[in-house]
Image (cartoon, rainbow, N blue to C red):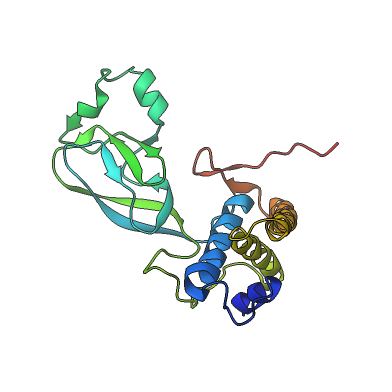
Amino acid sequence: MLAEQVLARVQDPSAVFWDLHLEVYAALVEAINDLMLIIGRPTTIYSLQVTLNPRICWQPMPQNMLAITNIREIPWKTTLHTLDYTQSSWNSNWEADSSPNLPQRWAPLGMTYFIVHPAVEQATTVTVAGVGYPVQPGAWPPTGAETSPFHIEFEQALELYAASYLRLKEIGDDAAEGMELYKAYLQIAQRLSKIDDRRDSLVYSQAFGVPVAASRVTMR
């Protein structure tokens, strides 16, 4: 249904100019992911057992997880900056530290890794909680069977984003029209963010990767 609406917006209802799987479905998947990040509300939170690789601080992100919010067995969350510049309980070569016990701290590292310190000396299983992708990554391209986690009244925003995404394939007036569609998408996303801020004071922060208090600054 959403794909049909997107194709109608770009005046290609039969999907002649735009490929249905490689472009239209892909655009809608990106729209869903982008809207979740703008709103700041995770749509899927789950926990799973992760086995830490021994004698290395750098650990791969669990499959299908966008960001880690907590590791149950590791008490302290820190940052890569702190590990590099605040050596209050370990030396400057902290990457080489290991221990027969569980790590005492963990830190996010981009979108594909996280850090534990000190490293475990043998494979150890911990419980990781985190934010999952609203559309789980799978075989590429998308099949069209993917579902949106948002309320039906906000599907228009997804259509606008996808149509703007598709118009990047063109130039001139068509591409300029695509930018107008993207601006309309951002306006709806902003409105949705304000609605959710009133419903819930906790947001998913891009800077910290965890729920934090929403700013109470009022509009002037």
Q: Residue furthest bottom?
A: 14
Q: Residue at x 24, y 28 (%)?
A: 95
Q: Residue 117 in the image: state x and y as whole percent.
A: 28, 33
Which quadrant would residue 138 be assigned to in this image? bottom left
Q: Which residue lies furthest to the right in this view?
A: 220
Q: Residue 30 in the image: state x and y as whole percent.
A: 54, 60
Where's the C terminus, which quadrant? top right
Q: Work out whether residue 125 or residue 172 is closer to the camera in this orientation and state it.
A: 172
Q: Which residue lies furthest to the front in this view?
A: 172
Q: How many labels does the image show?
A: 0
Q: Is residue 210 left or right of residue 124?
A: right
Q: In this view, does 116 lie to the left or right of 40?
A: left
Q: Is residue 148 left or right of residue 11?
A: left
Q: Residue at x 66, y 52 (%)?
A: 200
Which quadrant would residue 76 be assigned to in this image? top left
Q: In this view, does 56 lie to the left or right of 166?
A: left
Q: Residue 208 in the image: state x and y as whole percent.
A: 50, 38
Q: Work out whether residue 48 or residue 146 is closer to the camera in this orientation and state it.
A: 146
* Above or below: residue 87 compared with residue 150: above
Q: Residue at x 57, y 51 (%)?
A: 37
Q: Residue at x 70, y 72 (%)?
A: 9
